[in-house]
Amino acid sequence: MLSYQFREGVHIAFNESDVVITTPYATRLNSIQQSLHIDRPTDALKILLRDLLDRGVSREQHLELLGQLEGFYTKGLLSVELVGLEGAAISLNPVKSLLRRKNAPGGDYRVRFSRFVNVQPLVDGLEITSPLSSATVRLKDQRLFPILMQLVLACDEATLKEALPIDLRSHYADIISLLLSSDIAGVCDGQGVADIDQEAVEAGWTTEDLAFHCHTREQMIDVCRYQAIPTSNNTNQLPAKHQRIILSTAALPSPSRINHNLSFFQVVRERKTIRRYQEQPVTAAVLSDFLWHSMHIREEILCDPGLSRAYPGLLRPVASAGALHSIELYLCINRCIGLQSGFYHYDSCNHSLGKLRDLGEPCLQMLDLAAASTCRAPQVASVSPGLGQRPDVLVVMSARYGRNASLHQQTGLSYALILKDVGSIYQQLYLVATALGLAPCGLSFGSSELFEQASGLSSRLECSVGEFMIGNPLSTDGYGLRAGSDLRP
């Protein structure tokens, strides 16, 4: 028999003339949990509400209020549990504010798990969910664990029944309904694709991308899912300005004035990726301009000064969510007139480079990886595999994740906002490099392991999230500017 009970996070206030049901759901922008008001409830409805709070009910116990019970179910307010001879066997726990009941279809059919499911072991069983699911399913009875193997592939009714314990086989239809209603399993087509996966499979979504997208772009959130995560708004642990222990400091020349005859729209029009370099390397003066106009700190500010979560922020030429600016620049300098080769951190406050190490093996491998990545660009026939050039300078963007997490851990948006910052920095680097007449190229791939070896930092504390390379352009090849073109100041 199925038992219904208000899920965790539901609270009820009984007033003289109405009842207020507080749900566990809120929007991203408003953490206040949404409420449901019932005016002048009957005595029978009050009894139902108290039973749903305390001990749970079956559908048969309140047939006269079946419509109300179904309404609570579809609003994602009820947990459903099936009990066998050995206690609780399987439960459905909604995580979204809309839940559709689905029953086993008639005739011959096959069901299978969504290919995007995730199984997590917990103290009281195995929890199954997916980015597309509106509820999680928890297997509490270990005798049900074998159905996991059956549902990996398209499974017919007879096979699934055989995998169930004898005392639960009579509840086969209820178990199928829980699996289908949660959207962790679906009915298969002729190719064995579950109906709930059809559109995502046709679009080519991967499990990792779909999970990341759904988690960071949902408007309605389940507040209870985040309350279990310990949070802290202590941004003092990660100050706005970042200092590194360095071997030596390399002062950069003062930034020069950019050519005022070069219009912003000309820079935008001419912005392009250039992957081939001339023998003459970039100079420290040009590199100084490049870093200054891209990432120097203009000002340190106090963000949200009127709130308890007030934290130090930064203003740079490039945008950052909440002015957090958790992205730092590290430079693999392969060759640069006026600077020694090596691995440096850009001090965006003092506009200087702090040398961390010589150009050792991890740095050389990063340069080789960058050169190899440029050969994979489908639009550049002139750069053949094996002929990619090491850039003069490889810029590695790293993120101090904890700085974003101190503000966004509860919303789950930390990494998504970091990647948005990376995209903003990419465009800034492109535009500044174009204005300086450099050959810019943003890379789609890099190695966290190599950055960790080169920097000596744990990737859990500071991780590489983007790479960008520059040099002096060789010539016009259809996708690059001429060396010494009118874009050079």
Image (cartoon, rainbow, N blue to C red):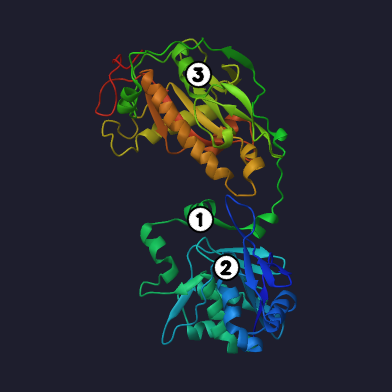
Q: What type is the residue that disc 3 sits on?
A: Trp
Return the residue at label 1. Answer: 214
Query: Are there few (<14), some (14-19), or many (20+) residues within 10 Å of tag 3?
Result: many
Q: What type is the residue that disc 2 sits on?
A: Ala
The residue drawn where x is 48% and y is 57% is 207
Residues marked 3 and 1 touching at CB (< 8 Å) = no
Q: Position of residue 302 (x, y in %)?
A: 65, 29
Task: Choose top left, top right, bottom left or bottom right for residue 41.
Answer: bottom right
Compute the Cα span from label 3 to label 1: 37 Å
Give the SS element for disc 1.
Answer: helix
- Does 91 appear above or below 236? below
The residue drawn where x is 39% and y is 66% is 198
Q: What type is the residue that disc 1 sits on?
A: Cys
Q: Where is residue 379 in the image (x, y as percent from the top left)?
A: 28, 37
Residues marked 3 and 2 touching at CB (< 8 Å) = no
**Quadrant, the N terminus:** bottom right
Q: Can residue 379 be seen in this view?
A: yes
N-terminal label among 3 and 1: 1
**Quadrant, the C terminus:** top left
Compute the Cα span from label 3 to label 2: 49 Å
N-terminal label among 3 and 2: 2
Task: Choose top left, top right, bottom left or bottom right for residue 44.
Answer: bottom right
N-terminal label among 2 and 1: 2
Q: Position of residue 264 (x, y in %)?
A: 36, 22
The residue drawn where x is 49% and y is 52% is 213
Return the residue at label 3. Answer: 292
Q: Could you tell whether 17 is left or right of 329 in the image?
A: right
Q: Residue 135 carries which label?
A: 2
Give the SS element for disc 3.
Answer: helix
- Does 56 appear above or below 285? below
The residue drawn where x is 49% and y is 28% is 318
Compute the Cα span from label 2 to label 1: 14 Å
